[in-house]
Image (cartoon, rainbow, N blue to C red):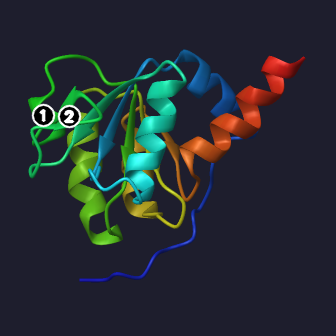
Amino acid sequence: MSLECELPDSNPLDDEIKELLQKAKTIAIVGISRKEERDSYKVAKYLKEHGYQIVPVNPVYDEVLGEKCYKSLSDIPFKIDIVDIFRRPDAIPPIVDEAIEIGAGAVWMQLGLAHNESAKKAREAGLQVVQSKCIKIEHSKLLKESEKK
């Protein structure tokens, strides 16, 4: 079991990431924590404050940030646009497999996370893939800019 993180083999261009964030409505946060100091909580809170429907995914909780928390992606009864992953690299392959199974639009591996084999598999299944980038940072960088113009 490797805890080492790979470097991403590729990532979409900023324009593609911006378009993904503009089109997305529902974002599953896999590995979310209820601890306010954790990045997963801060990111989910930010996304919710910016109009996204966040869908917490963690088998430990019933709810996070006032939203029903699901045990797995497969338990979510509606379409997910982006699966945002906050788990160790060795946990990524089964999450990506599940994202493909449920027909998610994209898989987003948070800053410091990359799994090229899973990314390739997701791309081949038609999902967009972003690796080792923080969705909160990318949103504030790419969409806040366009709000100013």
Camera-side residue of 31 and 106: 31
- Residue closer to the observer: 108 or 129: 108
If you read the primary sequence from the N terminus, does the residue marked by circle 1 or circle 2 appear first?
A: 1
User: Residue 100: x percent and y percent?
Assistant: 27, 37
| SS for callout 1 | helix
Q: Secondary structure at mark 2?
A: helix
Residue type, numbered disc 1? Ser
Q: Which mark is residue 101?
A: 2
| Mark carried by residue 94 | none
- Residue 87, by quadrant, is bottom left
Q: Point out the residue furthest to the right here.
A: 149
Which class describes the residues within 10 Å of circle 1: few (<14), some (14-19), or many (20+)?
A: few
Residue 29 at x, y percent in the picture: 33, 41
Q: Is residue 63 above or below residue 95?
A: above
Q: In the displayed structure, does residue 10 sit left or right of residue 47? A: right
Q: Quadrant of the C terminus?
A: top right
Q: Is residue 48 above or below residue 95?
A: above
- Residue at 49%, 32% (x, y): give it: 47
Is the C-beta separation of discs 1 and 2 under 8 Å? yes
Relative to 66, does residue 134 appear above or below in the rendering?
A: below
Q: Alpha-carbon distance for marks 1 and 2?
A: 8 Å
Residue 98, by quadrant, is: top left
Circle nearer the viewer, 1 or 2: 1
- The reply to whether residue 123 is visible in this rendering is no
Q: Which residue is mark 1?
A: 74
- Look at the image and tell me in which quarter the N terminus lies: bottom left
User: What amino acid is labelled 2 in the image?
Assistant: Glu
